[in-house]
Image (cartoon, rainbow, N blue to C red):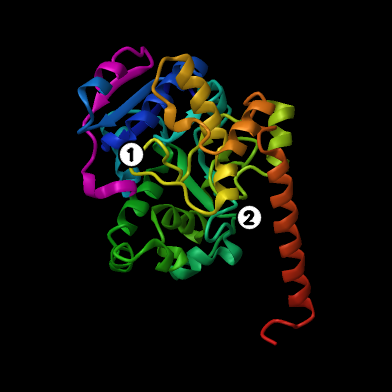
Amino acid sequence: MGQLGNMRVCVHENRQAEEPALRLLLLSVARHSPKTKLVLFCSGLTQAFYDFAATFEQVEAVYPSFPVERHWNVKPDLLLHCIRDLGFKDVVWLDSDIIVTRELTQVFGQFSADVFLMAQETLWATTPDDNGAMRARGWGFDVGREHPFALNSCIIRATEQHTALLERWQDMQTHEDYVTAQKQPSGQRPAHLRGAQELLTALLCSKEFSDTKLEYLRLGRDVVHSYGLKAFPLRQRLQWMKNGPPPFVHSQRLKPWMPTYQAGGGWLNRCYEDTFPYLLLADKLGTREGENVGWARAKTLMGRLMRATSFGYPPLCGVGLAAAFDAGFGAARLIKTAMGRDGCQGR
């Protein structure tokens, strides 16, 4: 099993607009995971945030962030820096837009040092699966295994045993095809070049790294992504009610704390967004701790009603809409399958 004293949870942020989410992450760690040792990599944030971070005994150190232009491509650089230069044997990356609900030393302490850990991708992703290891095949790799779904790098756990994997991931980000693809809008990029997590998914499917012991943080059980109409289906709600909240609630692509944020989609989409678990937890946690979380309040009348009638309990808030969306997506899937079997496609 993991050695709890060696584990560090690392967070990287260099955008002032993301400070409200980062403050909530620190508050949630202090409340739910007091044994965790946090290492922050931050630059360009307000002095008020640095003063705020200094009040947490869980924050072990604050280092300068990596170059701004690296964006999400910074992850292998930072993980390797933590392992090689800072001497951390067991490192967890957390995106700054995550709220923690459990003691993390227990979550990660159950895994041996040879386990590499990633999260399952949201169901609402453009390519939520990895059929036939398509990302690895896109890179021309010999395939050694397949994943049952696409992977999300919002949470990564790596140890000193994974330096070779991290180095290859780092090198792939300088590949001409990837660099060129990143200049295009995300929706126009090939699936295997869409972002840094696609590169890591491909590597973990490749024959070269097929022996790497891999575990997944599963949707509902371990992580909930607040994003899209499939964000929180009935199955995940039942898991929450049965087992309690998952350790991680992620505000994927949803950035309501940013001054320029505007809810997308139609009225029904905006009502459903008001029930997203991240916003419910942010509202409760922020209000309790005296944070300005007006951005987490419901923006629609239906959203306010759903929050009131469910007492803000995430599995029940918006459950009727979730059931309707589940039924709609299920029916669409059945129709698509039937059309494929009948050879009706393209007629």
State the image coordinates of residue 54 (x, y, percent, origin top left): 28, 15
- Disc 2 designates what residue? 148
SS of the residue under disc 1: loop
For the C terminus, which image quadrant? bottom right
For the N terminus, which image quadrant? top right
- Disc 1 designates what residue? 259
Residue at x 78%, y 77% (from the top left corner): 341
Magenta stretch contains residue 185: no
Q: Is residue 141 above or below residue 33?
A: below
State the image coordinates of residue 81 (x, y, percent, origin top left): 28, 37
Q: Amino acid at mark 1?
A: Pro
Q: Is residue 256 left or right of residue 214?
A: left
In the rendered image, is residue 112 in sight?
no
Residue most toward the bottom? 347
Q: Residues within 10 Å of mark 1 (few under 14, many from 20)?
A: few
Magenta stretch contains residue 71: yes
Range of the magenta residues? Answer: 50-72
In the rendered image, is residue 47 in sight?
yes
State the image coordinates of residue 103 (x, y, percent, origin top left): 54, 20
Residue at x 69%, y 36% (from the top left corner): 237
In this view of the protein, which residue sits in the foreground, 107 or 279?
279
